[in-house]
Image (cartoon, rainbow, N blue to C red):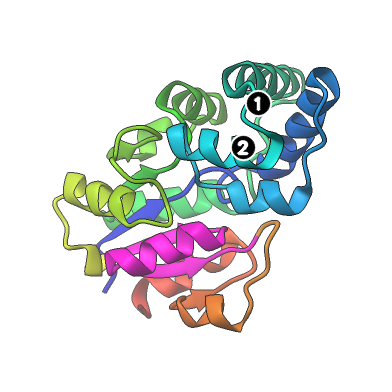
Amino acid sequence: MVKGVLFDMDGLMFDTERLSLEAWRFAGRQLGFAPRDEFLLALRGSMGDEARAKLQREFGPGFDYDRTRQVRLAYADSWIEQHGMPVKPGLLPLLKELKARGIPAALATSTTRPTAWGYLTRAGVKDYFAASVCGGEVERPKPNPDVFLKAAGLLGLDPGTCMVLEDSPNGIAAAHAAGCIPVMVPDLTQPDPALRALCARVVPSLDQVIPLLELL
């Protein structure tokens, strides 16, 4: 039986992966580079020095990672300020159900804490999370298992009793490597047979997660 639920954030709780792609395109127009969607999708979950290295391999050693990040975040912040947080359907009912059942939730995201906490606050869901692990707070990013192992530890739970909700291949690989119960809620990437094999379940939306709490 599931004793805890570990949540990814971008693309899972919030429809921010599409916003991120548009922020990358905007930064490319502003700073003179042309990002490929395929590369950006594969980049999800990377952070810090690893992301910097991948970007410099893609765009050259002179790629200004820090300036690009500033432009991207400013674009996303402006969009959210104007339109509000794009909350995925089913998020709030799921969080309320977990609270009612006494099943703790933890955030496990590659996004930095100031940004992640700002998103949760704007969406009005911050208080539903008993613990959180954000970008830069573990040694190795997804697809390594570190973020989920730490999140489970903060909840005082064995990883094998924790359901992980993820939308990306890197996240599912990390959840599987951690020995958790990976449940994929696809966003921009649909699972191929190899990725599906790593999942305990694949469901189309967060609305479909509640019945799994007693099945897995």
Q: Quadrant of residue 20?
A: top right
Q: Is residue 202 magenta?
A: no
In primary-sequence order, the first of circles 1 and 2 is 2
Q: Can you say whether 88 is above or below 136 in the image? A: below
Mark 2, residues whose alpha carbon is within 10 Å: few (<14), some, or many (≥20)?
many
Left or right position of 132 against 42: left
Mark 1 crowd level (few <14, some 14–19, many ≥20, 10 Å Cα): some
Instruction: Read off the residue under disc 1.
Output: 63
Tell me if residue 11 can be seen. no
Q: Which residues are magenta?
A: 162-186
Q: Give the amino acid at mark 1.
A: Phe
Instruction: Please name the residue shown 50% across and 58% down the image.
Output: 170
From this view, report whether residue 156 is shown above or below residue 172. Answer: above
Viewed as shown, does residue 52 lie left or right of 77? left
| Residue tagged 2 | 55
The answer to whether the residues at label 1 and label 2 have Cβ atoms under 8 Å apart is yes
Looking at the rendered structure, the kind of residue marked 2 is Leu
